[in-house]
Amino acid sequence: MSGYPGIRASDEDRGRTAAALGEHYAAGRLTLEEFHERLDKVYAAKTLGELDRLMADLPRTDLGRPPQRRAAGPVQVPAGGSTLAWRTAWRFWLAISVVAFMIWLLGGARGGLWFLWVAVPLGLLMLRRWIAGGPRHGRRPVNRGSQDRGSPGPR
């Protein structure tokens, strides 16, 4: 960190060291117990030398440089759509269906099986989308920048 181990550490120095420890924990170089132990020592450190000793057995990280970003481009999604998105959608459907059923049940189970009018159509719509391969994104946006806005159009 510094060539001056006796210099008093600032809050910014402690924050940088804590962030570096977080990166090392995320990379698997530290266990949760080691991470918490070192983090406590970071915030108790008074000098740069104490901070350096906490990081001595870990590789250097460059926190001043922003993380590298991927180049912009299309995201590859499996043919059936995002599995996580479908799981979330089906869980939402299940939650809505269970809530409707519980309201029907707590209401004395009268008035017919109205909760099915909530669960079945929503479930059928989701099933149709799932079989079709996910949401339709085939529509292309209209590029209006190339049109002359002042012209009245074809005559």
Image (cartoon, helix red, strand yellow):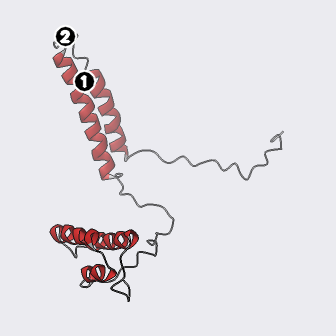
User: Is residue 59 shown left or right of residue 142?
Assistant: left
The kind of residue on which mark 1 rests is Ala
Contact check, label 2 and label 1, Cβ < 8 Å = no
Between residues 24 and 146, which one lies in front from this camera angle? Answer: 24
Locate the N terminus by quadrant: bottom left
User: Is residue 151 shown left or right of residue 109?
Assistant: right
Kind of element beneath mark 1: helix
- The spot of residue 14 in percent (x, y) is 34, 71
Callout 2: 10 Å neighbours few (<14), some, many (20+)? few
Between residues 13 and 6, which one lies in front from this camera angle? Answer: 6
Question: Residue visible at 27% across and 27% down?
Answer: 119
Quarter occupied by residue 96: top left
- The numbered dot on residue 64 is none
- The spot of residue 86 in percent (x, y) is 31, 46
Furthest residue to the top?
A: 111
Quarter occupied by residue 135: top left
Alpha-carbon span between mark 2 and mark 1: 13 Å
Quarter occupied by residue 118: top left
- The spot of residue 98 in percent (x, y) is 21, 29
Callout 1: 10 Å neighbours few (<14), some, many (20+)? some
| For marks 2 and 1 on the same chain, the one whose residue lies earlier in the sequence | 1
Question: Residue visible at 51% across and 48% down?
Answer: 138
Between residues 145 and 128, which one lies in front from this camera angle? Answer: 145
The kind of residue on which mark 2 rests is Arg
- Badge 2 is on which residue? 110
- Badge 1 is on which residue? 100
Up/down of 1 relative to 13, above or below? below
Furthest residue to the bottom?
A: 3
